[in-house]
Amino acid sequence: MTTNSTVNNSLTRRRFLTRSALGLGIVGLARELSAATSGFYFPAKAKAVIQIFLNGGMSQVDTFDPKPELTRQAGKKLPYDNLQTERRTGVALPSPFTFKPYGQSGIPVSDIFPHLAKCVDKMAIIRSMYAELPSHTMSLMLMNSGDQRLVRPSLGSWLNWGMGSENQNLPGYVALCPSGIPVGGANNWRSAFLPGAHQATYVRTAGKDPRKLIPHVQNQRIPISEQRRQYDFLQKLNDHHLRNRPGEMALEARIRSFEMAYRMQTEATDAFDVGREPKHVREAYGKGPQNQQLLMARRLVERGVRFVQVWHGNMQPWDSHGNIKSAHRKVASECDQGLAALITDLEQRGMLDETLIVCSGEFGRTPTVELETSGGGATAGRDHNHWGFSLWMAGGGIKGGTIHGATDEFGFKAVENRVSIHDLHATILHLLGIDHERFTYRYAGRDFSLTDVHGKIVKEVIA
């Protein structure tokens, strides 16, 4: 674990960065300085992450984990009286979708992902994920921060703190959502006890005008030269204030926020303007806010943003409690083309090997039909299922064309090579060249880490 002296050195480094003329202007040195003082880095396979949230709960048995036995037992009661879910469920509900093998690996994918299926040789599919509770809010917190109850720093905040951004004019951590705030609110991307500057910059992506995606990012009334004078004066006051209050993280975070807001005027609108892309690239990603924000994610990573989180929506678009056939096909069609284009685009630009893509929901769905809350008939949908679900990863050191783990014969519970959320986080950190056991921050008298006392690297999905 990290020693007290290590943490003190790390804090000194952040104070040094904060008090420099442009704060993050020398953030390219952050990794080397941390490596010298902390020792938790090693050669990385990836340097950036795009995390795609199909929030609401993607059904594993309707996407990447076909279960022929579920079809054979259609309409029959399954032996799962001991597996509690959020609502009452009934008999076996077979998938209404068709699976077929794709690529050289022959991995079967549902027909709701016709574009993404063609990229399966670039993907590692983990079929044995499990969470702890069938609750959206708690499972999203667990997936983001490793704790489902207490507010802890999110994965993106940990990476932003430990690695910084490669572009001083853009945040190191950006959360994209087409409308509103996702379930659980800002807790999904909070920095918690890490310095406040490392939480995500939230961007509502549904608008067409890139100048309006981040409100007030540009001041139309005062020329940039006058803003520079105001900013310099404000920094002098803040520096004087900080000298009398050393180690005050809230103040340091505020200073960093002013710095970032000033610098973003020069580059933010360009980064979020997908209209600057050639027509053939925009057409490859497809129309609609989901596909467009995936293109936006590529543009951000290309410009040095360390961690980009892409949400499907503000509520739970994948939460198919009723009529799974139409509901899942609809939401899949909103992102299928963009997901495939993202993998292909990154590969063509030589960026896939250094960009890790992680795509999942917060849990899966039951193979049994959900019953009406009144206790009546079936709804042809599926309830939340934290006992077993699937996700996929690509790029950034991932072994493509790989299937890891398995659920039982009906797809209810992970039974083979089970992977926890802590294991997933440990694996992501490993791919970024970080030892998850030594990557710690001292707070309230003890060392905290993203994976706490848990986490085992899933080596089988690493190239």
Image (spheres, rainbow, N blue to C red):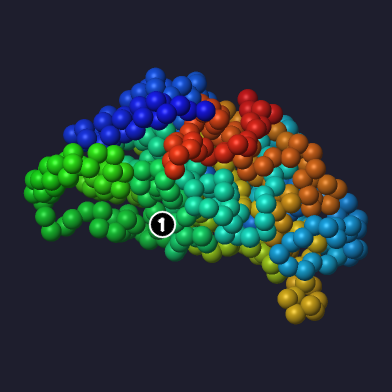
Please give the residue where the numbered disc 1 appears in the rendered image: 205
In this rendered view, identify the residue nearer to me: 295 or 419.
419
Q: Quadrant of residue 86?
A: bottom right
Tally of numbered discs? 1
Query: Is 354 situated left or right of 14 in this image?
Result: right
Is residue 250 left or right of 144 when viewed as pictured? left
Q: Is residue 161 above or below residue 315?
A: above
Kind of residue at badge 1 = Thr
| Residue beneath the point at 67% across and 49% down | 131
139 to 260, vertically: above or below: below
Q: Residue at x 57, y 45 (%)?
A: 146
Q: Position of residue 139 (x, y in %)?
A: 61, 54
Can residue 53 be seen?
no
Viewer-nearest residue: 192 or 117:
192
- Report x, y in % for residue 213: 34, 57
**Front-most of 231 and 1?**
1
Q: Residue at x 79, y 39 (%)?
A: 416
> Within 10 Å of the Cα at label 1, are there few (<14), some (14-19), or many (20+) other Cα atoms?
many
Percent across and percent down for residue 57 are 64, 57
Q: Residue at x 29, y 39 (%)?
A: 247
Q: Position of residue 330 (x, y in %)?
A: 62, 62
From where the camera sits, is residue 457 visible? yes
Name the image quarter holding the C terminus: top right
| Mark 1, secondary structure of its residue | loop
